[in-house]
């Protein structure tokens, strides 16, 4: 048999108070008692009845009680027996004039005429209410860690409703305030990504903010608004930009444009007229702009800057082509310097000996290993051979120091 517990509203006691013992005696195995007032509809008088709960008296019920003995009134602390003109019950309690069978009304409004059934039902309601309170308290505590308890507070009324504790989180995520605070989750779901938990979402925001602070980004990029929202981060979370990728983007702009030789920024603006540093940063922080494409554009600007430093010139199309061949910033600087050294003499020799024009494009083909590099190398070697041959003729110049020096310049 299940352990019997005291019904709601009863006072725990192993024996009745003295004034009730003198009137009713002392019931055996007492768990507790309760005094209920009624109104006699016949006389209008208010009287009381005593209910007791006794251990082992109610079979398999976990709790139970019964009204014990006669009705009574009190006069100066003394109990006086009172017999009402009708059967006492819920309809005869003070404020009602309708006699009837005893009824018991649970807190959800459901009525019972059986005390044991009422007690068991009410106990179950109380248990469920306690579970809802626990679910609310847990949610409140979790969100209070992030200063977001105001999102949970409107759910407090659910404690009184017949809502399953498992629904609390679902109800929370349906509120407008929650949807605003975690707006990027809707973007993620629309793109076939899973929605992040609150802890994952806020953890990403913290990592983004830490990266921006370390790179000296303006506070406007990570300033917090209502409920701690950081609107600038919504697109990063929505488009699944990892903290590693965000740092790579910022580092690309900072180290390869802003902190690089002025020629790089100048060439970038030459290739893409009207672009500002703010535009570069906005492009870098736009998840819709592919990071490889961003890096390709900056590499093209670095190649163009390498030509400019060597006193040469190259356009966007050629710089982009060189970038597609894998030419790096360092290779561009070294290669264009080599081209600047050999190009004037190569062009001069081609003109002297009536050979095909030796151009910057020809030199680039050989120096950077582009398509046509073999032919370009042959052309340069032929010009070198013609020059050497001209100084090894009957004039005897090849045997002089001047002849050897001039023949080796190209």
Image: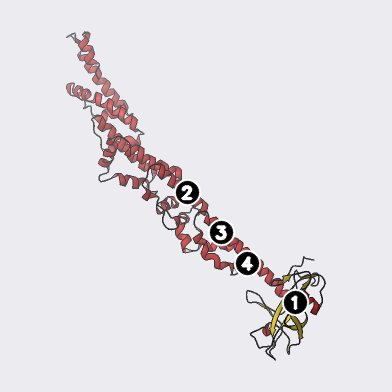
Disc nearest the viewer among 2 and 4? 4
Lateral position of residue 53 relative to residue 357, left or right: right
Of residue 272 and residue 57, the one placed in the foreground of this image is 57
Report, in whole angstroms, how far the alpha carbon at label 1 lies from the one at label 2: 61 Å
Q: Residue 119: horizontal and vertical position, in percent?
A: 71, 73
Lateral position of residue 20 relative to residue 286, left or right: right
Report, in whole angstroms, how far the alpha carbon at label 3 lies from the one at label 4: 15 Å
For the C terminus, the quadrant is: top left
Q: Is residue 108 above or below residue 298?
A: below
Q: Answer yes or no: is residue 288 visible.
A: no
Secondary structure at badge 1 equals strand
Report, in whole angstroms, how far the alpha carbon at label 2 lies from the one at label 4: 36 Å
Lateral position of residue 275 relative to residue 155, left or right: left
In the image, which disc is placed on residue 139? 3
For disc 4, the marked residue is: 129
Answer yes or no: do the residues labelled 1 and 4 have beta carbons within 8 Å? no
Q: Quadrant of residue 121?
A: bottom right
For disc 2, the marked residue is: 204
Residue drawn at x 41%, y 56% is: 225
Answer yes or no: do the residues labelled 3 and 1 have beta carbons within 8 Å? no
Report, in whole angstroms, how far the alpha carbon at label 1 lies from the one at label 4: 26 Å
Residue drawn at x 58%, y 67% is: 159
**Label 4 Cα neighbours within 10 Å, binned few <14 / some 14-19 / many ≥20:** many
Report, in whole angstroms, how far the alpha carbon at label 3 lies from the one at label 2: 21 Å
The tag earlier along the polypeptide, 1 or 4, is 1
Q: Residue 281: horizontal and vertical position, in percent?
A: 34, 45
The tag earlier along the polypeptide, 3 or 1, is 1
Of residue 56 and residue 48, the one placed in the foreground of this image is 48
The tag earlier along the polypeptide, 3 or 4, is 4
The tag earlier along the polypeptide, 2 or 4, is 4
């Amino acid at each position: 048999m299940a352990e019997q517990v005291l019904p709601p509203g009863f006072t725990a006691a192993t024996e009745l108070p003295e004034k009730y013992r003198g009137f009713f005696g002392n019931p055996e195995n007492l768990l507790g008692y309760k005094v209920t007032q009624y109104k006699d509809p016949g006389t209008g008088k208010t009287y009381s009845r005593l209910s007791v709960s006794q251990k082992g008296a109610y079979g398999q019920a976990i709790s139970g009680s019964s009204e014990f003995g006669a009705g009574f009134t009190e006069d100066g602390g003394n109990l006086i027996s009172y017999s009402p003109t009708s059967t006492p019950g819920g309809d005869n309690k003070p404020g009602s004039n309708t006699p009837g069978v005893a009824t018991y009304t649970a807190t959800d409004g459901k009525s019972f005429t059986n005390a044991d059934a009422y007690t068991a039902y009410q106990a179950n309601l109380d248990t469920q209410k306690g579970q809802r309170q626990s679910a609310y308290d847990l949610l409140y505590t979790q969100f209070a860690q992030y200063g977001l308890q105001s999102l949970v507070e409107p759910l407090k009324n659910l404690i009184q409703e017949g809502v399953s504790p498992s629904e609390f989180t679902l109800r929370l995520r349906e509120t407008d305030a929650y949807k605003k605070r975690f707006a990027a989750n809707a973007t993620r779901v629309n793109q076939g990504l899973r929605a992040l938990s609150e802890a994952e979402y806020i953890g990403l925001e913290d990592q983004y903010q830490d990266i921006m602070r370390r790179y000296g980004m303006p506070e406007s990029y990570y300033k917090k608004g209502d409920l701690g929202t950081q609107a600038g981060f919504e697109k990063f979370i929505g488009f699944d930009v990892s903290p590693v990728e965000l740092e790579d983007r910022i580092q690309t702009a900072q180290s390869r444009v802003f902190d690089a030789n002025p020629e790089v920024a100048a060439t970038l603006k030459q290739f893409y007229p009207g672009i500002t540093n703010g535009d570069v940063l906005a492009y870098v922080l736009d998840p819709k702009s592919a990071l490889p494409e961003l890096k390709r554009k900056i590499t093209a600007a670095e190649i163009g800057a390498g030509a400019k430093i060597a006193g040469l010139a190259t356009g966007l199309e050629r710089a982009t082509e060189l970038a597609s061949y894998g030419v790096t910033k360092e290779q561009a600087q070294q290669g264009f310097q080599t081209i600047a050294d050999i190009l004037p003499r190569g062009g001069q020799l081609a003109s002297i000996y009536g050979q095909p024009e030796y151009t910057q494009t020809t030199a680039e083909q050989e120096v950077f290993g582009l398509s046509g590099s073999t032919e370009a190398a042959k052309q340069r070697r032929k010009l070198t051979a013609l020059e050497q041959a001209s100084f090894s003729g009957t004039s005897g110049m090849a045997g002089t120091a001047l002849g050897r020096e001039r023949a080796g310049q190209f």
